[in-house]
Every structure is written in C-alpha cells, then in structure tokens.
Image (spheres, rainbow, N blue to C red):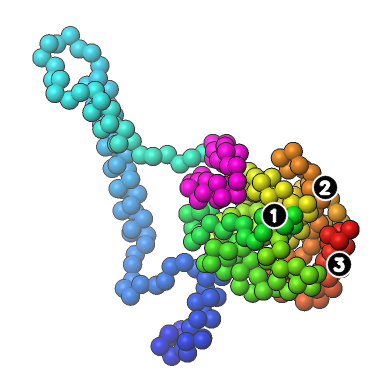
C-alpha cells in the first residue's frame, strides 16, 4: 500500500482521478467501521419504524371509528389524527411505470430548453440522479441546426456539469474542428443526463425514464441534422443490437415527436482514444457528415 504522504501532488491527483473514473465515491476513514453491524442496526431500526407505523395506523382506525359512548375523548380533532398517521407511514419509492409517466409529463410541459432544464433539475424519478454530482444538460448553440448526441456523462462531465468535458471533450473538439465546426456552432448533449455509477450502461428502465427528456430536447432544438456517437446512442435512436461499426457511415431518418430528422452515426471520442486505428473510419464519417451540411 502506497502512503499518500510519499506521493507528489501530480501523482496524488492522477490517483484520485483514476478512482473517480472507476466510480469510487467514498474514501476510507481513519478508524475501522463494521459495516455489517451498521446494516443489522439499520435494518432493526427500519423494522421498529414499520412496527410503530402499523401500531399508530391501527390506533388511528380504532379512534376514528364511531362509538356509542358519550365519553369519547374529542380533544384530538380528526385532522390532527390524519396528520399524525400520514407522517408515521414511510414514503414509498416511485414505481418505474409512474416515473416514466411523470418524466413524459414534465418533458411535454416544457416550451423551451430553459424550462426543460428546470424541469429535469427537480425531477426525482430516476435513481441515477442520486449518485450523480450534476445533471448534465445540453451545451452549445440551440439554433445551429446541428445536434451532436453522445450516450451519457462520464466522470469529467459529472464534475463539470457540461457534456463532453475532459479528454473525451478535447478529442471531440478535434473531430469537430476537422470539418470546420466547434462547440459554438453545434448543440452538444447526451441521451442520459445523469452519470451512471462507475460509468456502467444504463438499464432499460433507466433509459425509458430518460427518453422523454432527450426527445423533448430534440423537438425544442429542431436540428436539421444529428450526429450520433457510439454504441449506446446509436442503438437508442436506430434500435437493434448492432455495434457502432455496423451502424456508422449511413444516414438514417429518426422520427422524434412528429419530426423526422436525418441522423448519422460514428464512433465516440472514447473509441478513438482506446483504438487510435479507428480514427480513419471516423474521418470518413466526418467527411460524409460535412458533405451533408454543405449540400
């Protein structure tokens, strides 16, 4: 084990960055903690709370039932009993189906990107937001007519609150610059607005909950063209289980909210960083995308 006091600031920063990318969000404490014992205690506490809630509910039902006796205590009005009972019952998690309905309602109620962002910031139906630092919304020029859509925020995006930050963002900047574009001339966004823990792939339910938000973004921005990056985003818009190597290099019409938008898929910046030989394929795709812009 390497002691942190023997590391240079640069080495320590690199180590912390590595842990953040790996999804590590908690540091070790000075003294050992028995997490198993904590779990048992927490479980017992929840059991006590549930038992108390049942007892109070039963008491409320008994007290609220009309009785023939004229000596019944009326010092506690029914409204007070209702408040006591409601406060005692634990809050339930929102079911996935209800969360999808609420997400759709929140998205469709927004008449501008600013309103949509505000609605997403207060939306609590997706569990991904519980582990994310920031909600990552669209960035760039909404009236550009060009929308670049990636899969989900990474660790850098999550820290900065901006899509395509860090090294992946720098790679994307070079990709755009190669065809005469930059962040100010496109609208950058992701299918999923919250970073999944450890950069895992979002579950189908999480994807369904987030779908109304990205679709509403597209409708409000009304892009002429979409550049879709990577496996997850490609499958999200085109369907199927093909890899990006099978989806890339071909224009497809994507129906969204009454609009039909030409979309073109290519490799994600991370793909190019992991396999530099793929830059040749990405360059071919970017040239085809530029030709469509100029055409």
Q: Nearer the viewer, mark 3 or mark 1?
A: 1
- Identity of the residue drawn at 14% across and 23% down: 75
Percent x, y of residue 187: 68, 59
**Residue 70 visible, this angle:** yes
Q: Are marks 2 and 3 in contact (CB under 8 Å)?
A: no
**Residue located 78% across and 54% down the image:** 225
**Nearest the eye: 173 or 45:** 173
Cα distance between the residues tagged 3 and 1: 22 Å
Residue 62 visible in the snapshot: no
Q: Which secondary structure is most common in the magenta stretch?
A: helix
Crowding at mark 1 (Cα within 10 Å: few <14, some 14-19, many 20+): some
Which residue is the extreme one toward the left? 71
The residue beneath circle 1 is 143
How many numbered discs sit on the rendered protein?
3
- Residue 56 rendering spot, x and y as whole percentages: 25, 31
Which of the marked residues, 2 or 3, is nearer the chain's N terminus? 2
Residue closer to the observer: 26 or 156? 156
Mark 2: which secondary structure?
A: strand
Examine the structure image and report whether residue 73 is included in the region drawn in magenta.
no
Q: Which residue is mark 3?
A: 287
Q: Marks 2/1: CA distance?
A: 20 Å
Q: Is residue 173 left or right of residue 5?
A: right
User: Residue at label 2?
Assistant: 253
In reply to whether residue 124 is colored magenta, the answer given is yes
Identified at 86% across, 61% down, the residue is 294
Q: Taking 170 as reference, is 252 above or below it?
A: above
Up the image or down, 235 lies above or below 153; here it is above
Q: Which residues make up the magenta segment? A: 97-125
């Amino acid at each position: 084990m390497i002691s942190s006091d023997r590391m240079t600031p640069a080495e320590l920063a690199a180590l912390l960055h590595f842990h953040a990318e790996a999804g590590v969000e908690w540091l070790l404490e000075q003294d050992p903690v028995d997490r198993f014992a904590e779990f048992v205690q927490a479980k017992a506490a929840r059991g006590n709370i549930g038992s108390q809630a049942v007892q109070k509910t039963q008491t409320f039902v008994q007290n609220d039932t009309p009785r023939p006796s004229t000596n019944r205590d009326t010092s506690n009005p029914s409204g007070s009993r209702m408040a006591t009972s409601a406060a005692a019952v634990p809050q339930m998690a929102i079911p996935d189906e209800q969360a999808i309905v609420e997400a759709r309602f929140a998205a469709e109620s927004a008449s501008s990107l600013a309103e949509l962002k505000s609605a997403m910031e207060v939306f609590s139906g997706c569990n991904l937001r519980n582990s994310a630092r920031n909600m990552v919304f669209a960035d760039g020029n909404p009236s550009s007519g060009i929308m670049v859509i990636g899969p989900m925020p990474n660790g850098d995006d999550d820290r900065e609150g901006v899509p395509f930050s860090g090294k992946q963002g720098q790679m994307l900047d070079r990709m755009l610059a190669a065809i005469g574009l930059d962040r100010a001339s496109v609208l950058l966004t992701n299918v999923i607005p919250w970073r999944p823990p450890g950069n895992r792939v979002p579950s189908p339910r999480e994807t369904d909950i987030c779908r109304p938000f990205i679709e509403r973004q597209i409708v409000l921005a009304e892009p002429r063209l979409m550049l879709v990056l990577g496996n997850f985003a490609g499958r999200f818009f085109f369907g199927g289980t093909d890899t990006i190597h099978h989806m890339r290099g071909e224009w497809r019409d994507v129906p969204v909210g009454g609009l039909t938008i030409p979309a073109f898929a290519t490799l994600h910046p991370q793909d190019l960083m992991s396999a530099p030989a793929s830059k040749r394929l990405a360059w071919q795709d970017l040239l085809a995308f530029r030709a469509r812009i100029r055409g």
